[in-house]
Amino acid sequence: MLERAEIEAILDEVATVARPLCREGKVADYIPALAKVPSDRFGLCLHLADGQEFCVGDCDEPFSIQSVSKVFNLAIALEWIGEEIWKRVGREPSGTSFNSLILLEQEQGIPRNPFINPGAIVVVDALINRFPLYTQQLRNMMRTLSGNDQVVYDREVWRSEREHGDLNRAMAWLLKAKGNLVAPPDDTLDAYFRGCSLAMSCRALARAGRFLVQGSGDWPVIRNQDRRRRILSVMRLCGLYDAAGDFAYRVGLPAKSGVGGGILAIVPGVCSIAVWSPALDAKGNSLAGVKALELLVASQISSGHGLERR
Ligand code: DON
């Protein structure tokens, strides 16, 4: 096992190498609220299963977790609704961008997986129909999981998503036309956009991801080991949209990214890692974030703490 100081030195090195990639990417600009986020931010938090925590950079600055919220929606849907959710959404990689309409049309309104936008919209639809207070419950769940009462929905991001969400609106109406949306599309979208607008820091997100590291029975989301393993499988195959293959090759961890520049990655049984850097590559993933994870799995921490590809 490495000493704390050795791990800290490695994280500093990872940050030093990865952070400059901020200059090469582009901050999400599909909504004004995200376009103004400074592109030079970089934060990383590694939370080990034994509770030790290591942070570097802007790890306490809240950012918009965007599609990382889709993991939590899926976990809650599996716990509260069960396997029946898979009648409405698949679990295959899509190979297309997260907001593509094409597959949805071709595949009769059954989205390929819960991590592309139409899949997440269906999952949220199922949740709000059974649990009318779902958005409050989700926020409370994120507070509990992260041990942080400051976790909030960012109103400005939420409004911006609603005002500029025409493509998501098109997806929701197509889902409805194909018979795979129960609530009025705007109600489902409002709840979907809320999840996207959750503002959390790397530290809070890494803590919130602990329930995926190992099933201790203490976490309110998933008590079942088998379910945890299944969620991690979907993350592995579908977590980085149409870059999932490249990410698997370079990093090899189950993960979920968001266009806010955050990535939650899990080393089963070992740790939860949250990294954030808002400048994105062409597929919508954080450039410096992916690089940092790649460096981390190749580092000495890897041999000492079992972060090797698994
Ligand atoms: O709905 C959207 O397009 C964004 N609010 C979230 C997209 C994102 O993070 C990537 N999605 N899978």
Image (cartoon, helix red, strand yellow):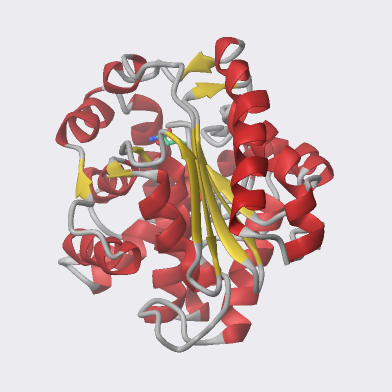
Which residue ends up furthest to the top in the rendered image? 23
Quadrant of the displayed image that contains ligand 1: top left
Tell me if residue 164 can be seen: yes
Q: Quadrant of residue 153?
A: top left
Count of all numbered marks drawn on residues in the image: 0
Q: Position of residue 178 (x, y in %)?
A: 46, 50
Left/right of residue 229 with respect to residue 212 in the rendered view: right
Left/right of residue 245 with respect to residue 192 in the rendered view: right
Q: Nearer the viewer, residue 301 or 91?
A: 301
Q: Residue at x 59, y 85 (%)?
A: 225
Q: Position of residue 240 (x, y in %)?
A: 63, 42
Q: Quadrant of the C terminus?
A: bottom right
Does residue 6 sit above or below 211 in this rendering?
above
Q: Position of residue 150 (x, y in %)?
A: 18, 52
Q: Position of residue 77 (x, y in %)?
A: 41, 71
Left/right of residue 287 with respect to residue 74 in the rendered view: right
Does residue 196 sit above or below 119 in this rendering?
above
Q: Quadrant of the N terminus?
A: bottom right
Q: Residue at x 28, y 30 (%)?
A: 161
Tell me if residue 112 can be seen: no
Q: Nearer the viewer, residue 9 or 216?
A: 9
Does residue 244 sit above or below 92 in this rendering?
above
Q: Residue at x 25, y 50 (%)?
A: 191
Q: Residue at x 40, y 51 (%)?
A: 203
Does residue 191 sit above or below 160 in this rendering?
below
Q: Nearer the viewer, residue 101 or 15?
A: 15
